[in-house]
Image (cartoon, rainbow, N blue to C red):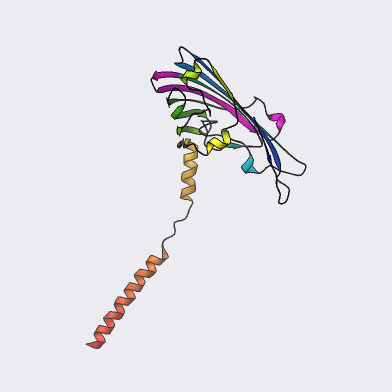
Amino acid sequence: MDFSRFDDRGIGRFSVNRLDTDLRQFFGFLAGRRVIATRLFVSTSDTGTGEVMPFYLMPTLGGNDTLRGFREYRFRGPHAILAQGEYRYEIWSGLDGALFYDAGKVANTRSDLNFEDLETDYGFGFRFNTDNAIVFRVDAGFGSRDGKHLYIVFGGIFRNACGRRAALKGCATATFATRSARSITLAISVFSASSSERRAGRRRRASIPTIRSGPTTTARSTRRTSCRSRTRTATTSS
């Protein structure tokens, strides 16, 4: 759990209090070769009378560690809730497969911060790990209205995630590491647009007029004039 106070010392319109809670629980069985990982993230904020929360301080959903079926920063709002679940199974030593499901949303008011009308996605992935941590992972997200996404990421989906040894006894963490850890995570996202979005993109490109380069034409005209001048000068000299 983390409480933050952002104080606007300029015009005094953007001061805000923000409270984030990030809970994770891991259940290991079959000698640690199977792990069920769960996560619940809730963020809420409060502003004074006549003040607003800057958009860059709002929690976001979408991307490699929240809603993996959506592009990065797809949803943004003063309040957010996210629930995630993964089933991990050992393929061989150092490599796990994973099936996951994500659900969450952002809200403008705290009263809308519930489990109704959530954005959802599902997918599968691979985890390259040691006994203590996930080193590298690949996730493919589907099932959203935002297309298909592929993420290649260094690090685990749940920060400070427990390794296989800890999963033998079960592992629980309650920490706030999301905002600080995102800056050191390398992710590659591949977005597959729907057919209607591709058609709209082609129409937008077709509506842009083509402008021919003026300097090229001017340079050609200058060269032609120079050649004619040299020809006249040679004729007069002869």
Q: Residue furthest right?
A: 49
- Dominant SS in magenta: strand
Residue at 39%, 23% (x, y): give it.
Answer: 94
State which quarter of the image contains the C terminus.
Answer: bottom left
Quadrant in the picture for residue 56: top right
The residue closer to the viewer here, 238 or 44, is 44
Residue at 47%, 31% (x, y): give it.
Answer: 155
User: Is 63 left, or right, of 109 in this rendering?
Assistant: left
Q: Residue furthest top?
A: 30
Residue 4 pos. (x, y %): 67, 37
Residue 207 pos. (x, y %): 49, 51
Q: Residue furthest bottom?
A: 237
Q: Number of callouts in the render?
A: 0
Residue 199 pos. (x, y %): 47, 41
Relative vertical location of residue 109 with respect to residue 96 in this rendering, above or below: below
Residue 103 is covered by the magenta coloring: yes
Residue 183 is covered by the magenta coloring: no
The residue closer to the viewer here, 15 or 118, is 15
Q: Residue furthest left?
A: 238
Relative vertical location of residue 96 with respect to residue 188 in this rendering, above or below: above
Numbered range of the magenta stretch: 89-116
